[in-house]
Amino acid sequence: MTAIAAERLSAHRLDDVSLGKIVQIREVLLRAQAAGSRVVRFESGDPSFSVAPHVLDAIGAAAAAGKTHYIPNDGIPELRAALAAKLRDKNGIADVTNHDVFVTNGAMHALYVTFGALLGAGDEVIIPDPMWTEVADNIRLAGGRAVRVSLRAEDDYAYDAEAIERAITPQTRAIFVNTPHNPTGAVLSREQLEAIVDVARANDLWIISDEAYEDVLYEPAVHHSVASLAGDWADRVISVFSFSKSHAMSGLRVGYIVTTASTLQERIGKLLRCTINGVNSLAQWGALAAVTGPQDHLAAMREEYRGRRDALVHALRDIPGITPFVPSGAFYLWAEIDPEAYDRLGVADADGLSRSLAANGIGSAPGDAFGESCVDAIRFAFSCDTTMVRTGATLLRTALLEGV
Ligand SMILES: Cc1ncc(COP(=O)(O)O)c(C=O)c1O
């Protein structure tokens, strides 16, 4: 841009949103891959699995039948009805109807729309730290402010209701909850979620529950939807779901928001109209087949993820200065780093470690990509294929033992 053009732009809230550290690491790996090098894609959480055949068939059939025209803004009625049934039967959220479900361009867009519909300028939302970066970015884009509550290894990264309560100010509008959690893989128990609902109720706060990883769980962990536990506070819970992780449909971009609050429903409809005017019709027909068709591939994917998790946990055991956390859900391995290990590893900090690993073809995401209280940590995603995870785990162990 020319200097004259730049001068004509006033400061903008987008200027405070970063382009993302994980994106930068990914670009290093993609360049190396394009140049023919072997790379290990531990940086991003994109499921390696193919979309189920019945989903692809449904997309093909919808295309052949000419279902390629404008569709209702909030989602095709068939999908909204099927999702309402899924939310009642599987998630235990009573009384949800198709009018309470809004189909979005993935959970990312669901968060953008939810915060946009809920927040006014200066409103605060309490979020865990570490947390997937885009949550705070979307709060900022809506004019709000993310207030961080630190999660600690000694508490198994539980999101503690008392710590949340201490972070409440007169500006607090909502508590953001994510279970299973990106980046730690922690899964909140029924009791922990009920305690968070009690805090919300006592302080007149909304809850936004991001359940993008509801199906990526390792026994004995169980997923609970906050809205199913909220009782008289259920109308104040806004739930966000995605087909990206559960059904490995990340590129098809289908997610959904669930809310029974009528004012929010009206605002969400307006934001959907002005941002997308309906999610891609064929992707929605695919999502309908995914939610109504056979579900056995979900268990098969879970089993595969469990094997990958165990391989990576095994590879990171007994490395001086590295403390991996065994995740109960999602497909990320989070490890804390003792700062004294940086010397041995030949790097200045976790960010440097992540960059050195990337230069050696191994993806990762440094702790400070997820917040302020977790700079001495690193995340490895095991959503890439099993062979890559197994080979990568060995390479990673060698790099962390011998220096990068
Ligand atoms: C916690 C969390 N929520 C939401 C999303 C967004 O997923 P999508 O937009 O693909 O549905 C992600 C993606 O990584 C995530 O980690």
Image (cartoon, rainbow, N blue to C red):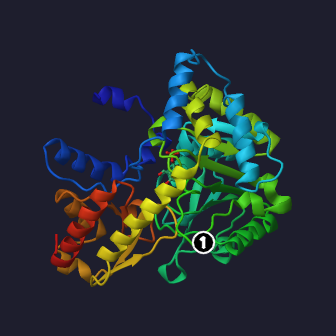
Residue closer to the observer: 205 or 48: 48
Out of 219 and 231, give the one closest to the viewer.
219
The quadrant the C terminus occupies is bottom left
The residue type indicated by label 1 comes to Tyr
Tell me the residue at 74%/43% (across/down).
Answer: 84
Q: Is residue 234 visible?
A: yes
Which sits in the foreground, 76 or 182?
Answer: 76
Judging from the image, what secondary structure is the residue with disc 1 in? loop
Give the residue drawn at x 74%, y 57%.
227
Please provide percent x and percent y for residue 178: 59, 60
Residue in view at x 61 percent, y 18 percent: 70
User: In the image, is residue 113 above or below residue 210?
Assistant: above
Report the residue marked by disc 1. Answer: 159
Residue 340 x %, y %: 27, 84
**With 60 as the anchor, is 266 left or right in this view?**
right
Q: Percent x, y for residue 104?
A: 60, 37
174 lies left or right of 384: right
